[in-house]
Image: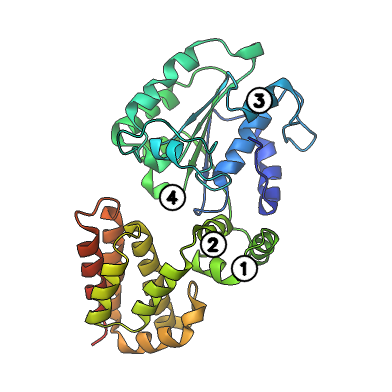
Amino acid sequence: MTTTKYPWQDEAWAQLQQLRARLPHAILFHGSEGIGKTAFAERFAQSLLCQTPLADGDACGTCDSCGWFSQYNHPDYRRVRPEILEEDSVEGDDAEGDGKKSAKAAKTPSKEIKIDQIRGLADFMNISTHRQGMRIVLLYPAEALNTMAANALLKTLEEPPPHTVFLLVCNGLDRLLPTILSRCRKFALAMPSWQQALAWLSAQGIAQPDAWLAEQGGAPLAAFAMAQSGSREILDEFLAGLAKPSIDSALKTAERLQKTPVVDLVAWMQRWLYDVFSVKLSGTIRYYPRYEKDLGVLARRVELPNLLRALKSVNERRAIAEHPLSARLFIEDMLIDYVHLFP
């Protein structure tokens, strides 16, 4: 593995180097999903372990330490992440990893970071470091910590082992315990400018990069992942149904898309409703500019109080979308509620 550098992170990287003189025992990298936070933290981890770092703080990429790091077998480096990321990781995204498939196919991999994973760090932190250097723990996404794991981590952060640095990555500070936040040095990573993100996507050979970027709220790695996923046809079908709402369309869409991840459908619905809301209030569109005319028509038809209730409802649905009892019924219910917004 070679740590990934993104051009929109150059300024943040320079700012991060200022922490080296008095390195905190825990740094929490936070920002929007799909902008490369984990890659940034992993790059920093390698640089901290590098034997001959470069003038700008980057790892040299050639020393023994960098060699071990690239193979994920550095004795002083550990990653803590949900099992699902071990099963299906995407290099360079906020869930990047080594791309290796686990042999654990007998059960559904967990989407949580569990207490046993935190307890499992004990042996790692109680042995001497290699060459009297530091040890690094990279944990992501931090919001995946379940309650018991979060409390176990908190105890470690309250009494950190010597020569140990925790690097945490999260997409939303509001999803972490305040006590964990208080024991980390927070480091914000900003969304790249539209021009930076568009240039990067174009360089990756993505067709219609502006459309993908808008639909992912300006997050280039999320846009890249969506463009590579082959889901354009599914997304377009879903949005076409939202543009011309009817009960018949809702039922047919739920039947055809019941095998599409429900979390994705809820996210698309959230963005669509946000655009309707934004058009109604200010005439602006953030996510789906291709549907400007349809969004304008819908914004004129909907009552603002009903739209606000719909936004709240879809937020609540996202919290349970990971495990719907029936995907088809879940989608039907969501779409029929949506249709009722437009009498």
How far apart, in angstroms, are the residues tagged by discs 3 and 1?
Answer: 38 Å
Residue type, mark 1 in image: Ala
Look at 48% across and 75% down and name the residue there: 288
Do residues under tags 4 and 2 come within 8 Å of each other at their CB atoms? no
Q: Which of the two discs, 3 and 4, sits closer to the camera?
A: 3
**Mark before the other along the chain sequence, 2 or 3:** 3
- Is 64 on the left or on the right of 332, as rendered? right
> Which residue has dot 4 on it?
172
> Could you tell me which quadrant the C terminus lies in?
bottom left
- Is 83 on the left or on the right of 58, as rendered? left
> Which residue has dot 1 on it?
207
Residue 59 image-quadrant placement:
top right
Q: Is residue 169 visible?
A: yes
Q: Is residue 284 visible?
A: no
**Mark before the other along the chain sequence, 3 or 4:** 3
> Which residue has dot 2 on it?
227
Residue type, mark 3 in image: Leu
How far from the left and from the top, in percent, is residue 235?
A: 42, 69
Tell me the SS state at disc 4: loop
Q: Which of these two is toward me, 175 or 37?
A: 37
